[in-house]
Amino acid sequence: MTTLISTTPKSINSRKSNAVPKIPFRKVWKRNSLLYWMLIPALAALLVFNVYPLWGIAIAFVKYSPTKGLFGSTFVGLKYFTELFTVADGVTLFRNTILISLSKIILGQLVAVIFALMLHEVTIKSFQRFVQTLTTLPNFLSWVIIGGIFLEVFANRGTMNHLLGSVGLGAVPFLTSPSIFPILIVTSDVWKGFGMGAIIYLAALTAINPELFEAAAVDGAGRWARLRYITLPGISPTIILLACLSLGGILNAGFDQILVLMSPLVKSTSDILDTYVYRVGIQQINYSLGATVGLLKSVIGFALIALSYWLADRFAHYRVF
């Protein structure tokens, strides 16, 4: 007992001595004042373009009329939220959005990882740079340009169906079949973005110590063994991190892409939240219902972003704050 009593104060004192001293904010401000002043333009832009427009959320709770204004419009409460899931078939909108977006995330990341692993094995650097440039280029083209090309290639009398007919196969309704069109949407998005996505994985591959591969080769490990036990574990934190952070955008299924390629024949499987907001909120001038969808999407997206950062911290040890 005497030993415990005598050693306890020493351990407490040593613990206090090892603790990091708390620096007053006044000294932190004095040391980094120029950096804080540089934040002022960014904070001003945040207030003007992100915080101030939040008053428009109230449009979702009133029967908005541009002539009467927000305060002169009739308050209707949750009427448009109820209408979204009944008259407007909101369940189908959420289903299409989540299925298309989730398919893009999973398939896009898988193809980017496989392509990065294949490109990393290329020993001819000039050919490697050429392929990487060629596959990254479509990412910088707008969907208006790519959509026009796809409409010509995959039309009922387009290039693809001509090729299928030349080998004795029947025409495939790529743009008019409700079951095939979402597949075209996902694959075209993956084709457009996998080159840019592979850049991050190539950077992660270059961070792996090359001595590990040399030691494994000396021990008799083959190409697949080195891939399984060195390469994949080396980039697994990056894969987990990007997968977690992509959850925040799961309600963004690609408005511009679907708007360019979609037709009324495939509306049942390709109509998403963003296209619905555009059609109802702008074309049909129903601002209240459009604001309701936007508010609901923002709330769910905020919750998913918070979840994605928690998952990134939990599995990839990545923290923003």
Image (cartoon, rainbow, N blue to C red):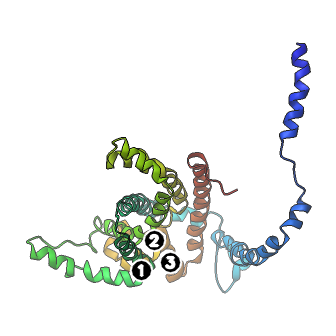
Look at label 1 and name its amino acid: Trp
Q: Quadrant of residue 27?
A: bottom right
Q: Amino acid at mark 2?
A: Gly
Question: As drawn, which residue projects farthest toward the front?
Answer: 218
Under tag 1, what secondary structure? helix
Query: In which quadrant will I find the N terminus?
Result: top right
What residue appears at the point 83 percent right and 40 percent down from the top-left corner? Answer: 18
The type of residue carrying mark 3 is Tyr
Cα separation, mark 2 vs mark 1, equals 10 Å
Give the residue displayed 12% in from the left and 71% down from the top. 170
Within 10 angstroms of label 1, few (less than 14), some, or many (20 or more) residues? many
Quick check: 239 left or right of 224? Answer: right
- Out of 259 and 133, give the one closest to the viewer: 133
Q: Which residue is mark 1?
A: 143
Residue at far left of view: 168
User: Given contact means CB atoms under 8 Å apart, are the residues at marks 2 and 1 in contact?
Assistant: yes
Residue beneath disc 3: 278
Q: Which residue is mark 2?
A: 254
Judge left or right: residue 256 versus residue 6: left
Front of the two marks 2 and 1 = 1
